[in-house]
Amino acid sequence: MKKIIKKFRIIFSTFFIFFILGIIFVTFQVEKKVKYNQILEIKKGDSVIKTIKMLNPSRTIYFKLYLKFCDDGKNIKAGYYEIKGKYSIKEIIEILEKGNDKFFKFTIQEGLTLNQVIDKLEEEKRIDRKKFKEELLGIEFPYVTPNHNFEGYFYPDTYYFPEYFTEKEIITTILNEFLKKFPPEKYLDKQNFYKKLILASIIEREAQVKKDKKLISSVFYNRMEKGMTLSSDATINYIFDYKKRRILYKDLKVKSPYNTYINKGLPPSPIGNPDKDSIDAAFKPSRTKYLFFVAKGDGSHYFSKTYKEHLEFQRKNKKNR
């Protein structure tokens, strides 16, 4: 009997030692700080563990064990979180439970105008429109902004803003993204850059596929070189705030500095916010002799050197519809 008791004590002691060591090891892992650099999205109703697994799959087991002592993550709040820097599991769970570092996701699509961006922010109840426009007036920027017009500089991308961000902080975050893509020290001739930005905004609105951008750019350069008007429907659309479903012949005669059917050269400012591909196309167009282009059914364009060829394609295109 004594041998059995002794054996039991040894087994119990061994188990207890391993149990204590296990607790120490798990505690160490929970307190251990690991480097993270990503956006975590937690949706209502989603499995917390499944979502957190995206942060670091190798540490999922420690998240699970820690959450068992934290009501299984019931206090974690849905939203976007930027987990950037060194954090322990305990610190990450605290961030997610407090919700203080929640972000909201905001996407600027290619070609959107500044007013459309402001409309979208206002619709999502992220800004006060009047205050936003007032803040724009006080922004110092290294590129040309005639009459504080920032059209063209609101770089198309998906942004994650902290919930507490002010109008000014939202503006500076977006503009800083533009400056990252186009460092001011790289483009010394700011007037020339602005002209390229204007052209890029037109290319952005005209092109539906990336491969056409440099070709469209070449058409516009060739037309300007020959003293022709750009004759871009996109600039007409801009006059009407892109609200017209169809451009009519009478619209091409509207009096506006943005009407490139009656005014030669570039309009006075960008007609939207282009992406890097469009700006690159404005700086480095393809070398062609094309003077015309027309949209095909698949989103790409047909390019031609003569007006006769341009009209012939349009006729054939109509017949095939």
Image: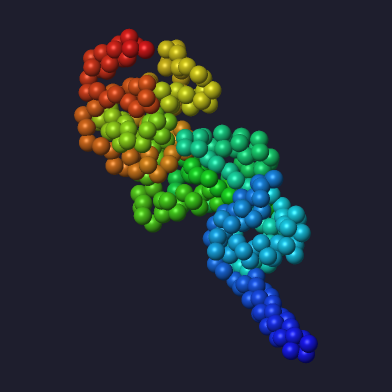
**Left or right of residue 46: residue 210:** left
Taking depth in this image into account, of 49 and 210 the one nearest to the observer is 49
Q: Residue at x 29, y 24 (%)?
A: 302
Residue 96, percent across and down? 69, 57
Residue appearing at x 37%, y 21% in the figure: 297
In this figure, what is the number of numbered marks? 0
On the image, the x and y values in percent for residue 295 come to 35, 22
Please state if 268 lies on the left or on the right of 15 as rendered.
left
**Where does the image place residue 20, in percent across and percent down from the top left?**
70, 79
Q: In this picture, is 35 found above or below 270?
A: below
Residue positioned most to the top: 319
Residue in the image at 74% along x and 83% along y = 8
Instruction: Where is residue 108? Give x, y as percent.
Output: 53, 40
Q: Quadrant of residue 279?
A: top left
> Is residue 255 visible in the rendered structure shown here?
yes
Please tell me in which quadrant of the rendered image residue 223 appears: top left
Q: Nearer the viewer, residue 57 or 161?
A: 57
Q: Is residue 283 above or below residue 228?
A: below
| Viewer-closest of 65 and 236 | 65
Which residue is outermost to the front? Answer: 1
For the question of whether residue 169 can be seen, the reply is no
**Along the horizontal axis of the image, is 1 left or right of 38?**
right
Which quarter of the image is occupied by the N terminus? bottom right
Check the picture and name the quadrant holding the C terminus: top left
Q: Tell me the residue at 75%/65% (across/down).
A: 69
Protein image colouring: rainbow
